Image: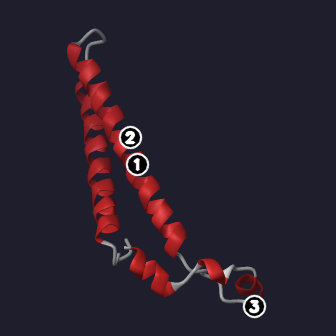
């Protein structure tokens, strides 16, 4: 996991990890223990899973937007560097946005 200078992005990365672990444990418990089809817990479990998935998608979206803004090109050959719009990427502007 990369180190982030933006604390909000670091928080979202940590939350993403926690939410995925929580979702995995809920789904694992659900299949190991099982739930009756008409159980009132089934609705609560499905609602909790849906909320976790929504939070995961939200954090992924925020992280992806941040990476699109700050990511530099990884390749250093002449052709790939020539195709990059350097006017849209500025290291100082990326640091001052946060």
From the image, state whether disc 1 or disc 3 is nearer to you. Answer: 1
Circle 1 crowding by C-alpha within 10 Å: few under 14, some 14–19, many from 20: some
SS for callout 1: helix
Please indicate whether residue 34 sits to the left or right of residue 74 in the image. left
Question: Relative to residue 60, is residue 86 depicted above or below?
Answer: below
Q: Which residue is mark 1?
A: 58
Circle 2 crowding by C-alpha within 10 Å: few under 14, some 14–19, many from 20: few
Question: Relative to residue 48, is residue 68 depicted above or below?
Answer: below
Q: Quadrant of the N terminus?
A: bottom left
Are the residues at dot 3 and dot 2 in contact (C-beta closer than 8 Å)?
no
Please indicate whether residue 78 sits to the left or right of residue 40 in the image. right
Are the residues at dot 2 and dot 1 in contact (C-beta closer than 8 Å)?
yes
SS for callout 3: helix
Q: Residue at x 30, y 27 (%)?
A: 47
Q: In this orientation, which residue lies closer to the viewer: 10 or 24?
A: 10
Q: Position of residue 68 (x, y in %)?
A: 54, 67
Are the residues at dot 1 and dot 3 in contact (C-beta closer than 8 Å)?
no
Numbered mark located on residue 43 in the image: none
Q: Position of residue 38 (x, y in %)?
A: 28, 8
Q: Which residue is mark 2?
A: 54
Q: Position of residue 24 (x, y in %)?
A: 31, 43
The structure's colour scheme is: secondary structure
Question: Relative to residue 48, is residue 54 depicted above or below?
Answer: below
Circle 3 crowding by C-alpha within 10 Å: few under 14, some 14–19, many from 20: few
Q: In the displayed image of the protein, which residue is found farthest to the right?
A: 79
Inter-mark Cα distance, 1 to 3: 36 Å
SS for callout 2: helix
Q: Residue at x 32, y 26 (%)?
A: 46
Residue 50 seen from this side:
yes
Q: Which residue is mark 3?
A: 78
């Amino acid at each position: 996991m990369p180190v982030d200078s933006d604390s909000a992005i670091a928080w979202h990365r940590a939350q993403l990890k926690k939410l995925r672990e929580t979702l995995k444990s809920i789904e694992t418990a659900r299949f190991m223990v099982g739930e009756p089809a008409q159980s009132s817990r089934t609705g609560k479990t499905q609602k909790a899973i849906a909320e976790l998935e929504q939070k995961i998608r939200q954090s992924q979206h925020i992280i992806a937007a941040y990476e699109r803004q700050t990511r530099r090109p990884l390749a250093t050959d002449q052709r790939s560097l020539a195709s990059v719009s350097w006017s849209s990427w500025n290291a100082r502007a990326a640091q001052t946005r946060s």
